[in-house]
Image: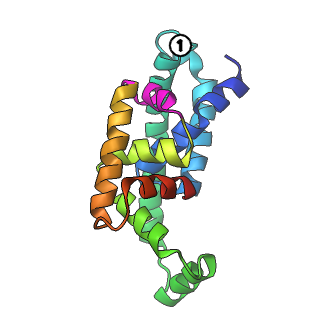
Amino acid sequence: MDLTTFVNAYRGPLIGLIASWGAPWGDAVEIAQDSFSEAWLNREACRGDWNDPEVFGRWLRGVALNQYRNWARSRRRRARTMTLAPAVLEQAVSAVDPEPDQQLDALRQAIGRLPVKQREVVLMHYLEETSVKEVAALLSVSAKTVEGRLYQARRNLRRLLDGELSVAQIGRMLLCL
């Protein structure tokens, strides 16, 4: 497998997985890029056939987890040394999104309250538009397990949104995030 094929095969699912661990989207992209470089440069350290998607996907997830942990540690260190005045923070947030769509905002908050396994498949499948089969390979579970987690996640999102939206509406909204 060459580098381009490697990145194209795993980019979307990996970013979604890292975002499901709690990294903001922009940081998840950066962590994924760092994970790709680390994994590609050290691919000989992968036990087993690194051309096998199941073996390499599992190993890449481990590399990404280590990169995420390093990012989280450095973020905690920076948080201790940097503080923003509340007025500056409010001004920055309002400049980015002056009129947030309330339903999408509520959906984003509800996604954050999902159990980890459901949140990771939602982010990988809907936000990164990754197929169920690719999500299953990266998570080392069956496609049926991923489908079940997606089903449960949509039901939980409906419950978290107080039943205001149908499961079908939630599915359409997830595609708009």
* Residue at left offset 33%, top offset 39%: 149
In the displayed structure, does residue 139 sit left or right of residue 3?
A: left
* Residue at left offset 27%, top offset 60%: 159
Mark yes or no: residue 10 visible: yes
Residue 136 placement (x, y as % from top left): 43, 28
Count of labels shown?
A: 1
Decide whether residue 137 is among the magenta residues.
yes
In the displayed structure, does residue 69 sit left or right of residue 155?
A: right
What is the basis of the colouring in this image?
A: rainbow
Residue 150 placement (x, y as % from top left): 37, 42
Decide whether residue 95 is among the magenta residues.
no
Residue 46 placement (x, y as % from top left): 50, 17
Q: Assign the C terminus to one quadrant of the image.
A: bottom right
67 and 104: which is toward the camera: 104
Q: Assign the N terminus to one quadrant of the image.
A: top right
* Magenta stretch, residue numbers: 131-142
The extreme top residue here reads 49
Residue that carries the numbered disc 1 in the rendered image: 52
Mark yes or no: residue 114 visible: no
* Residue at left offset 30%, top offset 51%: 155
Q: Is mark 1 on a helix, strand or loop?
A: loop
Density class for disc 1 (Cα within 10 Å; few <14, some 14-19, many ≥20) is few
Which secondary structure class fits the magenta region best?
A: helix
14 and 129: which is toward the camera: 129
Residue 4 vs 164, above or below: the answer is: above
Say what amino acid the circle numbered 1 marks.
Asp
Residue 32 vs 47, above or below: the answer is: below
* Image quadrant in which you'd find residue 121: top left
Residue 165 placement (x, y as % from top left): 38, 63
